[in-house]
Structures are given as C-alpha cells and as structure tokens.
Image: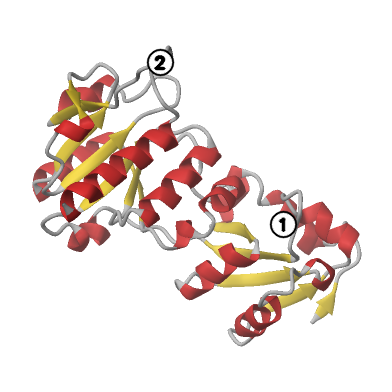
C-alpha cells in the first residue's frame, strides 16, 4: 500500500478533477465515498479502479475487511494522512474511504427483460438537485421499483452528491438515462402505462388504479413535468395539498407515489 503525502500528486489532482462532470464524462469514471456506498458498489459488481484510505477516520465497523476485499481484486490502494484525505473528501465527517470507479451505463433495450406484468418504476424528468435524485433512488430501492429512468437530465447521475444522497442505492437500482422520445417509444412497445404526477390533475393518486405495468413520472423541482409528458400520459394524478403550498418536494412526492403503488399490489 503506497502512502501519498502531497496535494500536488497527480493521483490527488485526478480525484479533485472528477468532481467536475466534464472530467467524469471524458474518463467514464466517478467517485464513491463512504463505507456503505463503497460496500454496495462492490457487492453489485461495480469496478473499483483505485482506493484511497485514511485509517484514522475509520468508524471501526468493517472498513478493514472491505479494504481487504477490494485489494483482492487487484485494485491500487493508497494511504493518506488526515489532512490530505480531508482535502479530497466531500463530506463534513469523512470515514476514511474514497474510491475511483468505472461508470456502468444501461439502455432501455438492456432493461426490457425487467418489464414483466406488474412492473413499476420511476421516471425522473430533468431533476436539478443531486440530493433529490439520490433520495429518489433510495425510495425506489425501498419500495421495490424495478429501475429508474432519468429523462433529459440536468444532474449527472454520477455526481458525488447523488452517490452520497442515494446511500449506495445507485448501485442497487438499475438506472437508464435517455431522452423523452426514446422513453415514449419504449412504453408504447412494451405496453407500459405512463402515469404523470401533476397538481393540475383531477384524480387523486390513492383513488387511481396503479396496478399493471406502470411508469411513475415525476418532473422538475420548479415546473413539474413538461407539456410533452403531460400530453403523452395515460393517467394524470395529483397528491392532495391541504395547506398553502401547491406541491411537495419532488423526492417526497415520488416516495408517496411509490408506496401507494406498492400498497395496491400488496392489498
């Protein structure tokens, strides 16, 4: 295990450069920080290219076992002093584990086998905030959604803050990034019902049949779903708002939609 001590080391500079989308796109690499996130990535087959550790920050769970597991995959591992690990970390309280990993991308064609009868999944159109996208992933995992489709993204799915907010579920929920027209064609071919959540709908989501093959479509934080989505939708549903606000946070709304869909299947 090599020890790095200088912030001018090319390996340290590379980590910092991967905070930028352009660099992630050019290299097809991204950052994973944190024990839970890294364990989930390893267990779900993501390729770890290099690992940076600071044992002084370990929370004394199973960090060493995870490092040994990664090392067996012939991954380069580097030890950093506290001050240098704090420089590369994007957390207030780092736990001493940060990796560079290879991006894994899926297409709609690759996930069509998941579109069996009764399948449900989330479609996130142009979500802007990494925290919301990460939380949508977390809710999708918790509620058993088959996959997540990100249409016309404003936020890179491999943004470090998406990885962090997802708490490792980025690696457990299959994610497809595509444009709207690809998605609409896919739904038509696979006979998937497009359900659009919008405050302008007349039907309340709990009083609507969400069984069958269904895509739960959620829109941008500020404007909601685009007109194209609303026009293509087979169902328009709303979440009742009893106060002065006219809508919920998109991640919260997604969670409600997912659990109502799950409830109907279990009920």
Q: CA distance from mark 2 to mark 1?
A: 45 Å
Reply above or below: 229 against 256: above
Q: Secondary structure at mark 2?
A: loop
Residue that appears at 51% across and 68% down: 40
Left or right: residue 262 compared with residue 235: right
In the rendered view, does 254 fall on the left or right side of 115? right
Residue highlighted by disc 1:
15
Q: Provide the secondary structure element on which disc 1 rests.
A: helix
Q: Quadrant of residue 197?
A: top left
Where is residue 221 drawn, in percent x and y?
A: 45, 26
In the picture of the structure, the residue carrying the numbered disc 2 is: 243
Please report whichever mark, 2 or 1, sits nearer to the chain's N-terminal start: 1
Q: Residues within 10 Å of mark 1 (few under 14, many from 20)?
A: some
Judged from this view, the residue extending furthest toward the top is: 244
Q: Look at 48% across and 45% down and name the residue there.
A: 135
Q: Position of residue 58 (x, y in %)?
A: 76, 70
Residue 124, horizontal then vertical, whole percent: 36, 38
Whether residue 186 is visible, yes or no, is: no
């Amino acid at each position: 295990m090599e020890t790095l001590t200088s912030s001018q080391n090319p390996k340290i500079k590379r980590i910092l450069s991967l905070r930028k989308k352009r660099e992630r796109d050019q290299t097809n690499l991204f950052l994973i920080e944190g024990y839970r996130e890294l364990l989930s990535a390893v267990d779900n087959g993501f390729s770890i290219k290099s690992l940076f550790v600071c044992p002084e920050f370990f929370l004394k769970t199973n960090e060493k076992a995870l490092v040994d597991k990664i090392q067996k995959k012939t991954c380069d591992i580097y030890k950093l002093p506290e001050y240098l690990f704090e420089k590369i970390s994007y957390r207030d309280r780092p736990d001493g584990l940060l990796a560079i990993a290879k991006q894994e991308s899926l297409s709609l064609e690759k996930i069509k086998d998941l579109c069996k009868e009764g399948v449900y999944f989330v479609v996130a159109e142009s979500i802007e905030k990494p925290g919301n996208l990460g939380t949508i992933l977390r809710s999708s995992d918790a509620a058993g959604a088959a996959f997540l489709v990100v249409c016309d993204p404003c936020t890179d799915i491999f943004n470090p803050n998406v990885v962090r907010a997802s708490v490792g579920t980025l690696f457990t929920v299959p994610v497809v990034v595509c444009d709207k027209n690809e998605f609409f064609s896919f739904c038509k071919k696979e006979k998937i019902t497009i359900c659009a959540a919008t405050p302008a709908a007349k039907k309340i989501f709990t009083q609507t049949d969400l069984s069958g093959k269904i895509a739960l479509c959620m829109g941008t934080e500020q404007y909601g779903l685009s007109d194209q989505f609303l026009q293509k939708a087979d169902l328009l549903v709303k979440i009742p708002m009893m106060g002065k606000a006219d809508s919920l946070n998109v991640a919260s709304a997604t969670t409600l939609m997912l659990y109502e869909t799950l409830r109907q299947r279990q009920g």
